[in-house]
Image (spheres, rainbow, N blue to C red):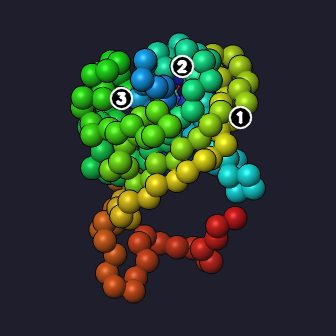
Amino acid sequence: METDSSLPGLLRNALRHTAQTVAVVTTGGPEARSAMSATAVVPVSMDPPSMLFCVNRGASCFPLFLEGHGFCVNLLAAEHQQLAEQCSGGLKGEARFAAGEFATHPNGVPYLPSALASIFCVQDGRYLYGTHAVVLGKVTEVRLTDKRGPLLYYDGGFRRLPIADTPPEGQDQGAVMGEEGDW
Ligand SMILES: Cc1cc2nc3c(=O)[nH]c(=O)nc-3n(C[C@H](O)[C@H](O)[C@H](O)COP(=O)(O)O)c2cc1C
């Protein structure tokens, strides 16, 4: 663990305690498109169905967000780790699309059909904050595939849940503390 005692360093270390499902956020259209690994993706509400995405203003996809393109949050399964690495710097630009089996939605936005879920959003607000922009997405469509273990990012590395992808008949995956909720 880093010993950086500056406030950002302490915050970084604090956030190492959070486990996030990794997504590839896709955006753009026929002229230009982008795919980027991201964990700063947060559900906002079910009424209206909405998501938030925090994107670095230095990221190559940022100009596409400024142009107002819709986007898709593709939640990754454990088997997508290599793609997550490629979409976080291992590859650049169009090469990322050659690395995964992406498709294009009729609305023009690229997406990853093998993702656990593809959550399509139109932009419904944008807020510049420091190095980042907070992009509010109004959900327009959700596509789900078979339930598999998610790809997680925890303590500075990619992880998978220590459970089988398919739970035994009649059993839940992992430990569920108390009632399962859907807030
Ligand atoms: C697990 C993980 C999560 C990330 N989450 C975000 C994020 O939420 N927002 C962001 O702007 N960058 C995030 N990044 C960094 C971007 O993936 C990376 O900077 C980006 O792919 C660089 O893209 P570019 O070469 O197209 O600019 C994350 C990287 C990793 C490995």
**Residue under the point 37% across and 43% down:** 112
| Cβ atoms under marks 3 and 2 closer than 8 Å | no
Marks 1/3: CA–CA distance: 25 Å
Q: Is residue 94 visible?
A: yes
Q: Is residue 8 above or below residue 155?
A: above
The disc label shown at residue 50, or none: none
Q: Secondary structure at mark 3?
A: helix
The kind of residue tagged 1 is Asp
Can the viewer see residue 11? no
- Point out residue 104 in the picture as x, y percentages from the top left corner: 39, 37
Residue matched to label 3: 87
* Comes first in the chain, label 3 or label 2: 2
Q: Earlier in the sequence, mark 1 or mark 3?
A: 3
Specify whether 147 is left or right of 130.
left
Residue topped by disc 2: 64
Residue drawn at point x = 55 percent, y = 14 percent: 63
Disc 3 CB within 8 Å of nearest ligand 1 atom: yes
